[in-house]
Amino acid sequence: MRWMVVNGEMFAALLVEHTVLSILPTLIGLLVAVPLGTALRSRPRARTLAVIVAGVVFTIPSLALFVVIPGLIGTRILDPVNVVLALSMYSLALLVRSVLDSLDAVPGAVRDAARAMGYTPLRRLFSVDLPVAVPVLIPALRVVAVTNVSLVSVGAVIGIGGLGSLFTAGYQRSYPDQVLAGIIGTVALALLIDRLLALAGRSLTRWRRTGAAAP
């Protein structure tokens, strides 16, 4: 704890970096997974293939991706884009199946009612399907976000890891207080993001509590 107090400015900068590297891939994964899941939902063969590919992608070690990506897209080894891209791939791999499951959870009667009211497919997606799918999707999004907070630390091995750099620096210097600062910051960030997403989920599903309270 003493290291955090003495080096508050450095800790804050690393915390901000860690936060950006964690949240950005989560958002990218979600923005890609939603339209992809929507497109795959009614295509059984393509859906099965996508789920299989997603499972394979998630088995690839994160450190391997951090090292390989620069050679594939021509970035520098210390470019934060490598971490963002790798974690976006993991986020997409986890979320695409969750998006499919959450859309499957929307009752057919609800879709039929929206169709009878003249909703276009796009309007039905944003006005009906996604709002009803939120209770299933939010827990998956929380898992992805917390996983990314943890995986960002691995990037410290190649020089980009936010709070993870405190682990490597503290270990090299045999300075456990610095390692402890990294652990505390990482855990606190994961808990904060998880809580914010939980609150967002509650806010977006007020209709469930209203419906439960109705006579």
Image (tube, rainbow, N blue to C red):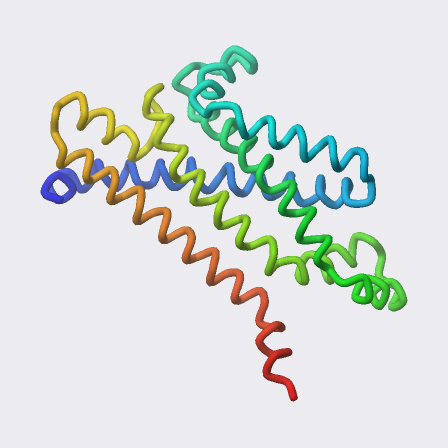
Residue 81 position in % (x across, y down): 47, 25
User: Image point 44% across, 38% down: which residue?
Assistant: 148
Say which quarter of the image contains residue 160.
top left
**Which one is in front, 204 or 147?**
147
55 displayed left or right of 43: left
| Number of numbered discs overlaid on the protein picture | 0
Q: Quadrant of the N terminus?
A: top left
Q: Quadrant of residue 171?
A: top left
Estimate the x, y position of residue 74 in percent, counting from the top left. Answer: 53, 12
Left or right: where 144 falls relative to 154: right
* Residue 47 coordinates in the image, percent (x, y): 75, 37
Say if 79 sits above or below 125 in the image. above
For the point 18% across and 42% down, the residue is: 8
**Looking at the rendering, in which quadrant would you find the C terminus?**
bottom right
Residue farthest bottom in this picture = 215
What's the residue at 84%, 68% (across, down)? 113
On screen, residue 119 above or below 73? below
Q: Is residue 131 above or below residue 147?
A: below
Q: Is residue 155 left or right of residue 104?
A: left
Residue at (59% x, 83% y) in the render: 213
Side of 133 where 115 appears, left or right:
right
Query: Which is nearer the eye, 179 or 20?
Result: 179
Task: Please determine whether, in this image, residue 110 is positioned above or below residue 84.
Answer: below
Residue 166: x %, y % from top left? 23, 31
